[in-house]
Image (cartoon, rainbow, N blue to C red):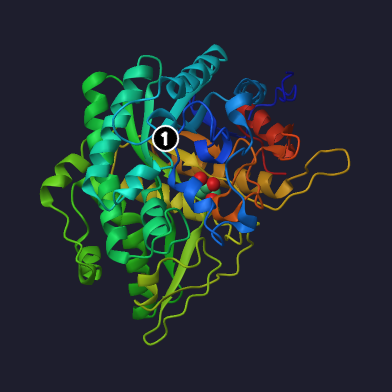
């Protein structure tokens, strides 16, 4: 594989610190395929995809982009881009098919081989232990709303860490617990597709508890490794200065951001969010908070957009150019509306607002100081088709990543301890309820042939990495 990096020696106009991680991210169910191979058990996504009407065109991750068989080719692609780190997720049902009891060594061997290939290529492996593919048997026993699931997760995490922790030093426990809890158990847009507000709050709590228990278990094995979670954070603004809009922004910021950040980093749930959710009987045991807030070594931030919200008494409808338009059934009953703010949008309809990323980063620095931060996801999805010669000229994605990296650069210049950036995603892949209709990859995948072709953004990103920063603005 030849390098995608241009032979340019121009110094960057916006240099990033030495040692800054330049990465790309993926997740197991979205890329691996091989759903019925190697002893893998069924996950909630296998079941959800087979439920009529849940995923666009009835698509699923059975084959996805066949990374399970093509991982060496994919590592070579990463190498050609000059990535210094690669964030991937480990499929729990591949490693422990029923989510409890015996482990599947064939499943773990796949990740051993992947890690070996990455290390040989000089690319740091950054695994995530839970990116939404809960073993179906655990959901059959109640899923994340059940406390036992948190304990099962810690057991699985310790097992994987025992196998790889000598060579893998950065570990992410759970990815986007907001999505797993609220899209999975409140709005029903994601697996397992339940619509039960009370269950979704319990799920959020047990995802956080599972994180804390897993950190304890892994740290006991190898204290020198670095552990953290990846949360999806939004900048949140009121549509106007009207008190009801300001209050709506407080509530959405509470549910989206503070419900996860405060327990993780401060060891308490925000009082106002507890009050807002009281009617759903959410009363998490205080003792769990000490576990949830075990010191972490890094926080992963997945950032895509800003929420602009209005709160109008009597009006419970939502219009959304915000991600995940049906935020959850219970927000509707709180009279919150997501309001388009008129910014350009990606192919997902998500407003592009890089200033929001700067706000999120500087806020974290202000409110939870000295915690090492990483952007573990950031990118843009479009419905792209290649040109006649197979190339993809994705100027929109280049502009999106460029703008967000500039926001990172501004934050770092102000002292924010941001140490790396992983774009979402390395490859086009299965975009959950959107099936294969939205493409986020730096690398185009022809789903019929599995042929990989780097897009213009791949070449551009490779050049940024080679320079160690961004070129001057055109
Ligand atoms: O594809 C997802 C990913 O799995 C989690 N974060 C958001 C991405 C884009 O929707």
Q: Looking at the image, which residue is at 43% across and 61% down?
A: 188
Relative to 227, is 345 on the left or the right? right
- Quarter where residue 63 is shown: top right
Q: Nearer the viewer, residue 155 or 83?
A: 155
Relative to 90, is 37 on the left or the right? right
In the depicted structure, whether residue 188 falls above or below residue 191: below
- Image coordinates of residue 72 in percent, x first then y, are 62, 20
- Image coordinates of residue 39 in percent, x first then y, are 47, 28
Q: Nearer the viewer, residue 198 or 353?
A: 198
Q: Is residue 424 visible?
A: no
In the depicted structure, whether residue 204 falls above or below residue 456: below
Picture quarter with the N terminus:
top right
- Image coordinates of residue 91 in percent, x first then y, are 45, 34
| Residue occupying the far left of the picture | 287
Picture quarter with the C terminus:
top right
Q: Looking at the image, which residue is at 62% across and 42% down?
A: 429
Q: Nearer the viewer, residue 158 or 332?
A: 158
- Residue designated by label 1: 93
- Image coordinates of residue 162 in percent, x first then y, are 31, 19
| Residue occupying the far bottom of the picture | 314
Q: Looking at the image, which residue is at 13% across and 52% down?
A: 285
Tell whether circle 1 marks a residue whose Cβ is less than 8 angstroms from ligand 1.
no
Relative to 265, is 239 on the left or the right? right
């Amino acid at each position: 594989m030849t390098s995608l990096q241009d032979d340019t020696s121009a110094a960057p106009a916006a240099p990033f610190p030495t040692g800054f991680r330049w990465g790309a991210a993926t997740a197991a169910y979205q890329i691996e395929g091989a759903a019925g191979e190697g002893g893998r058990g069924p996950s909630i996504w296998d079941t959800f995809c087979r439920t009529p009407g849940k995923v666009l065109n009835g698509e699923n991750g059975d084959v996805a982009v066949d990374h399970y068989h093509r991982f060496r080719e994919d590592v070579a692609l990463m190498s050609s881009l000059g990535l210094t780190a690669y964030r991937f997720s480990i499929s729990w049902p591949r490693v422990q098919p029923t989510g409890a009891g015996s482990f599947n060594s064939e499943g773990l061997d796949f990740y051993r081989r992947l890690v070996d290939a990455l290390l040989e290529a000089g690319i740091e492996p950054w695994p995530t232990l839970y990116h939404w593919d809960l073993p179906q048997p655990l959901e059959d026993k109640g899923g994340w709303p059940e406390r036992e699931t948190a304990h099962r997760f810690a057991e699985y995490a310790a097992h994987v860490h025992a196998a790889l922790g000598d060579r893998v030093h950065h570990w992410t426990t759970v990815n986007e617990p907001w999505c797993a809890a609220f899209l999975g158990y409140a709005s029903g847009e994601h697996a397992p597709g339940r619509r039960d507000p009370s269950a979704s709050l319990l799920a959020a709590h047990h995802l956080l508890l599972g994180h804390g228990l897993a950190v304890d278990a892994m740290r006991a094995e190898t204290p020198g490794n670095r552990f953290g979670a990846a949360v999806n954070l939004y900048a949140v603004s009121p549509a106007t200065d009207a008190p009801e809009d300001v209050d709506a922004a407080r509530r959405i910021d509470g549910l989206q951001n503070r419900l996860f950040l405060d327990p993780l980093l401060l060891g308490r749930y925000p009082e106002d969010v507890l009050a807002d959710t009281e009617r759903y009987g959410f009363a998490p045991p205080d003792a769990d908070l000490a576990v949830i807030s075990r010191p972490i070594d890094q926080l992963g931030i997945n950032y895509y957009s800003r929420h602009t919200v209005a709160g109008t008494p009597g009006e419970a409808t939502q219009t959304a150019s915000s991600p995940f338009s049906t935020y959850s059934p219970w927000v509707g009953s709180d009279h919150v509306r997501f309001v388009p703010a008129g910014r350009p949008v990606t192919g997902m309809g998500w407003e592009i607002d890089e200033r929001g990323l700067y706000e999120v980063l500087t806020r974290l620095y202000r409110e939870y100081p000295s915690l090492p931060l990483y952007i573990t996801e950031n990118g843009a999805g479009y419905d792209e088709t290649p040109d006649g010669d197979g190339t993809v000229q994705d100027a929109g994605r280049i502009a999106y990543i460029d703008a967000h990296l500039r926001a990172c650069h501004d934050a770092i210049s102000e002292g924010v301890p941001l140490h790396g950036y992983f774009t979402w995603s390395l490859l086009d892949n299965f975009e959950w309820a959107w099936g294969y209709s939205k493409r986020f990859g730096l690398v185009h995948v022809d789903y019929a042939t599995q042929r990989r072709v780097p897009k213009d953004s791949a070449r551009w990103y490779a050049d940024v990495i080679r320079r160690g920063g961004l070129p001057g603005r055109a």
